[in-house]
């Protein structure tokens, strides 16, 4: 019997129009990924978040926990300042690394806004005005991985489309993505396992913001 061969995806076969010098970008695929040509990828732009009390706040015995970062968070230092002290309670302004007010957090109530999440816990001594915390959000590695809207490291946003297959299961590996200004065949794109039609539509909209139009 003759052998049956299955032809894999060709490098760049999803491209309808692009500019080689402008549209494509060399990248590093994060270790643990095994991605096909045409795979939609996101970029790791956010790292770990580290909370700390203001230096010199001798009376601050409260803590901050359940810290998380997600879509919309910025690398840098967030500042939380007590503006409304209260017995076993209190409210804190939350400013992002650019000094923009993100919201107001309440002690013992989970806070989530601007991509940042946390809960402030009261201590044995009540907070006073001006006390507070910082949350340092580290910058990500800039490496790429499979795009998924549930990712919390920045790769919940599309960063481009892998030009050729890259197997990085044994460690970080170099690759090329179509990162901007191109027209692609949407039917030839590769998505994360289980991606729904709506999730693909959202992903295509994210690519369109980069100037990558799916048809």
Image (cartoon, rainbow, N blue to C red):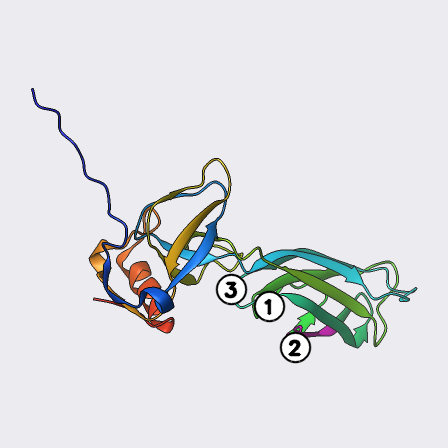
Magenta-drawn stretch, dominant element (helix, strand or loop)? strand
- Alpha-carbon neighbours of circle 2 within 10 Å: few (<14), some, or many (≥20)? few
Residue pictured at 46% horizontal, 55% vertical: 27
Rounded to the nearest angstrom, the CA distance separating label 1 from label 2 is 9 Å
- Give the residue pinned by disc 1: 74
Q: Which residue sits at x=18%, y=35%? A: 6
Q: What residue sits right under mark 3 in the picture?
A: 71
Judged left or right of residue 198, residue 110 is right
Is residue 60 visible to the viewer in this orientation of the structure?
yes
Residue 150 seen from this side: no
Q: Residue 7, position in %: x, y?
A: 19, 39
For residue 136, which quarter of the picture? bottom right
- Disc 3 or 2, which lies upstream in sequence? 3
Marks 3 and 2: which is nearer the front?
2
Q: Quadrant of the C terminus?
A: bottom left
Residue on which disc 2 sits = 98
Viewer-proximal residue, 95 or 77? 77
Question: Would you say 187 lies left or right of 68 here?
Answer: left
Q: x%, y% of residue 115?
A: 56, 66
Q: Are marks 1 and 2 in contact (CB under 8 Å)?
A: yes
Q: Secondary structure at mark 1?
A: loop
Distance of mark 3 from mark 2, alpha carbons?
A: 17 Å
Q: Residue at x 85, y 66 (%)?
A: 126
Q: Is residue 162 magenta?
A: no
């Amino acid at each position: 019997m003759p052998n049956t061969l299955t032809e894999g995806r060709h490098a760049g076969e999803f491209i309808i129009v692009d500019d080689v010098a402008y549209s494509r970008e060399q990248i590093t695929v994060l270790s643990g990924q095994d991605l096909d040509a045409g795979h939609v990828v996101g970029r790791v732009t956010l790292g770990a978040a580290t909370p700390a009390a203001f230096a010199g706040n001798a009376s601050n015995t409260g803590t901050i926990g359940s810290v998380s970062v997600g879509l919309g968070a910025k690398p840098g230092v967030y500042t939380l300042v007590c503006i409304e002290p209260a017995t076993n309670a209190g409210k804190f302004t939350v400013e992002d690394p650019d000094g923009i007010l993100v919201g107001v957090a309440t002690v013992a109530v989970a806070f989530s806004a601007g991509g940042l999440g946390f809960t402030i816990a009261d201590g044995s001594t009540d907070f006073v005005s001006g006390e507070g915390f910082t949350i340092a959000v580290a910058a990500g590695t800039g490496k790429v991985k499979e795009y998924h809207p549930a990712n919390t490291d920045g790769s919940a946003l599309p960063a481009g489309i892998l030009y050729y297959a890259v197997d990085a299961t044994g460690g970080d590996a170099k690759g090329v993505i179509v990162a901007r200004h191109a027209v692609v065949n949407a039917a030839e794109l590769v998505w994360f396992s289980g991606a729904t039609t709506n999730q693909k539509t959202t992903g295509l909209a994210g690519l369109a913001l980069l100037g990558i139009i799916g048809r």
